[in-house]
Amino acid sequence: MEKLLSYLEQNKDRYLTELKEWLAIPSISTSKENAGDVKRCAEWTANHMKKIGLQNVKIFPTAGHPIVYSDWLNAPGKPTVLLYGHYDVQPPEPLELWTTPPFQADIRDGKLYARGSADDKGQVFIHLKSLEAYLKNVGSLPVNIKLLIEGEEEIGSEHLAGFVKENKQLLKADLVLISDSSMFAKGIPSICYSLRGLAYMQIDLVGPNKDLHSGSFGGTVHNPIQALTEIIAQLHDKNGRITIPGFYDDVRPLSKKEREAFKKLPWSDKKYAKELGVKELYGEKGYTSLERVWARPTLECNGIWGGFTGEGAKTVLPSKASAKISMRIVPDQTSAKIAKLFTNHIKKIAPKTVSVTVRDLHGGEPAITPIDSPGVMAAVAALEKGFGKKPLYQREGGSIPIVVQFKQMLGLDTVLLGFGLPDENAHAPDEFLNLDNFFGGIRTSLHFFNELPNYMNGASKKKTAAPKKPKAGKAKAKKR
């Protein structure tokens, strides 16, 4: 390990030069004008995999942007890690808000600024440099590795699920490793072990068969906007609890260990409210802010419209009103069940003065990897060695659909080992990757691959341990 860490120190400048070269490719997956750049970025990724010593490098075309695959499978008896990431990036607009051009990486105040620096090229590059250190200095890896780097994550990974389904044998592994998330805060290494899922709905209300003059008809017809707001107002009680019958039936409660782990995180409700510009926080009574945003289900109105919203005045009583509602769900809830409960409840409480239609727009399932699983324990040990301090545990309130797909299609748990920061401006101008996290991430990756076999083998021995024999004189003879 000393040799590997020394190699890292000696090659820091080169690492940054290479990363800047990768970041210079505007691999904007949503832009047709950049389709050639996305392809060029896939080729750069594949060539770099070959350069550092990975094997079986292949670019798989899809109906959209290509998927890059490589592996190194010369460690018999050792665990196999499937490393997932993406080389595509978000559009850089608005360009005028960037301090320096988005595809000309610039280092300022210990941060590397460029589109894709944190999301996700920089974090993928962390592991590429770790693998390079092993292959160039040791000639082998302590684990088997498969890399799956796609080019459509920023546009919904439309063709990834199909690829995974068609290539189950190729992607067979013991666990998935993803670095596309953030630590809790600067200087506080943390491991994320759970994500919430999503049920996304639309409510459409229709009252009269056309827009009406509010002076001539107001007072005789139930305004659809009013009816819709009355429905939405009934979806929470005074304690912030969702009122849909059965909504909480399948919620997995937080363990004592988890709640204690959350309390160790440096968190201030007062600071959080100030940063958001609100006078007071709101949420389900009986839970802390972190518990509510990470481990409790929620229901939010994401948009509402109807009637006249243009400049000036128009005294209309609208015919229609609509709203979009999202519900974040937690283990062991399912999006299909929640969507059904929501639909039934809305139809039940809707007034007879309007017609209501509820549409299930899309859903995704929550994910959780036990904190005492071998992958998470290896990640915790690696983070402590990589950053010099014991990491903390956290969940994430958002969703990463591929994590659930890996579980459903490949049966694999995912270790979310992120090295970004909450204020890294991902998807916004002046996106950056903190260089302390970049180099600390490489150290962590080196230790993770080295630690994992110890934890995986320990878990395997525990599973296959022979049952204990009963003590002499204690076993009773069976009646025949």
Image (cartoon, rainbow, N blue to C red):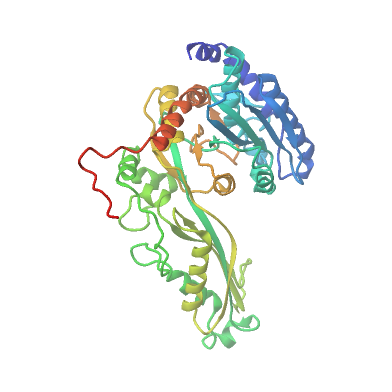
Q: Residue at x 35, y 41 (%)?
A: 267
The answer to whether residue 51 is left or right of residue 124 is right
Task: Pinpoint residue 412: horizontal percent, then vertical percent.
Answer: 53, 42
Residue 450 seen in the current view: yes
Task: Pinpoint residue 466: horizontal percent, then vertical percent.
Answer: 37, 36
Furthest residue toward front: 480
Quarter residue 391 falls in: top left
332 to 447, vertically: above or below: below
Q: Residue at x 36, y 58 (%)?
A: 284
The answer to whether residue 456 is left or right of residue 466 is right
Q: Residue at x 46, y 31 (%)?
A: 456
The answer to whether residue 250 is left or right of residue 125 is left
Q: Residue at x 61, y 76 (%)?
A: 320
Quarter residue 43 falls in: top right
107, 132: nearer the viewer = 132
424, 57: nearer the viewer = 57
422, 57: nearer the viewer = 57
The answer to whether residue 288 is left or right of residue 104 is left
417 to 4, vertically: above or below: below
In the picture, the quarter occupied by the C terminus is bottom left
355, 174: nearer the viewer = 174
Residue 109 seen in the current view: no
Task: Pinpoint residue 61: horizontal percent, then vertical percent.
Answer: 76, 40
Task: Pinpoint residue 88: horizontal percent, then vertical percent.
Answer: 67, 38
